[in-house]
Image: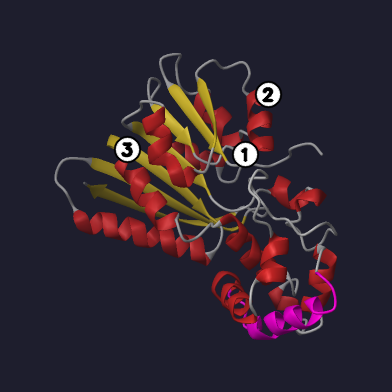
Amino acid sequence: MEFNHKSVMLKECIEGLNIKPEGIYVDGTMGGAGHSKEIVKRISEKGLLVGIDRDEEAICVAKKRLEEFSNVLYVHDNHDNIKNILENLTISEVDGILLDLGVSSYQLDEKNRGFSYRLDSELDMRMDKTQKFTAKHVVNKYSEEELARIIFEYGEERYSRRIAKKIVEQRKNKEIETTEELVNIIKSVVPFSKGDGHPAKRTFQAIRIEVNDEIKPLYNTIIDSIDCLKSGGRLCVLTFHSLEDRAVKNAFNDSVRKMYMSTWITILCLWSRNKRKNNYKKTNASIRR
């Protein structure tokens, strides 16, 4: 399947980064290179773009789409490791960092990745296919209490206990192997509500977050990103749901409260309520550290 992913809030991100021709920039979620291409087009040969993604398929696509540019470094890793990544590249500070959080439309639409509750496939949900931990392990090995907790915390699903109980009941008969099996289990206990969308939406989000450890490290990732910025640097973060938004805002607020006196940094948080419909709100903050 072709890697199709429309870059969300492209104009706002590029404006927020305030790109300098000779600057060093990091795209921590390179994806299909939509944001990356607009960044690298605006820097000179003396500038540099570091592109990071945990999805090897995304890295391969980005290399092809940016093959005309010689000032791009590609890193197959997790943006949570941004400090170590830059240290390994002997880069002490950068001018700007972009983080587009969550799952890409390509990953959702690619049937064999197991992210979608609308496509039947093996339960997987790994952003990094080199890791062994999958959605199938979560669904079949977690206790009822653990399942209820992650579905409630990461999916904000009010029927989390019902869903967890039904999953445990069903897997006693046979291992739950596919997304369709899981969807049918969820549908059997979650009342349909037109305003709430698909009954499996929140549970699939929760399991995906657990598999990819998307929330727990996020606070520290933002703090580390701020620490990697030069004076006058810019950090732009796109969040998709309230859990991401909360972690990012908490890190921003804690950084603001530190108020060291040497460096001005601008941070821009863009919250996309729906990446496909491009609805968003934004929060700006300037901090000194």
Residue 19: x and y, percent?
Answer: 41, 30
Could you tell me if residue 285 is visible in this image?
yes
Could you tell me if residue 16 is visible in this image?
no
In the figure, is residue 218 to the left or right of 126?
left
Sequence-wise, the earlier of marks 2 and 3 is: 2
Residue 263: x and y, percent?
Answer: 21, 40
Distance from label 1 to label 3 (Cα)? 22 Å
In the rendered structure, which segment of residues is drawn in magenta? 156-175
Residue under numbered circle 1: 31
Q: Give the amino acid at mark 2.
A: Lys
The N terminus sits in image quarter: top right
Q: Give the amino acid at mark 3.
A: Leu
Q: Give the amino acid at mark 1.
A: Gly
Secondary structure of the magenta portion, mostly? helix
Residue under numbered circle 3: 229
Residue under numbered circle 2: 64
Residue 26 is drawn in which quadrant?
top left
Sequence-wise, the earlier of marks 1 and 2 is: 1
Q: Please tell me how many numbered marks the rendered image carries.
A: 3
- Tell me if residue 282 is in the magenta stretch: no
Distance from label 2 to label 3 (Cα)? 28 Å
Residue 104, placed above or below residue 185? above
Q: Are marks 2 and 3 in contact (CB under 8 Å)?
A: no
Sequence-wise, the earlier of marks 1 and 3 is: 1
Residue 64: x and y, percent?
Answer: 68, 23
Residue 219 is drawn in which quadrant?
bottom left
Distance from label 1 to label 2 (Cα)? 12 Å
* Label 3 SS: strand
Mark 3: few/some/many CA within 10 Å (<14, 14-19, 20+): many
Which residue is located at x 55 percent, y 32 percent?
36
Residue 209: x and y, percent?
Answer: 59, 61
Residue 235 is drawn in which quadrant?
top left
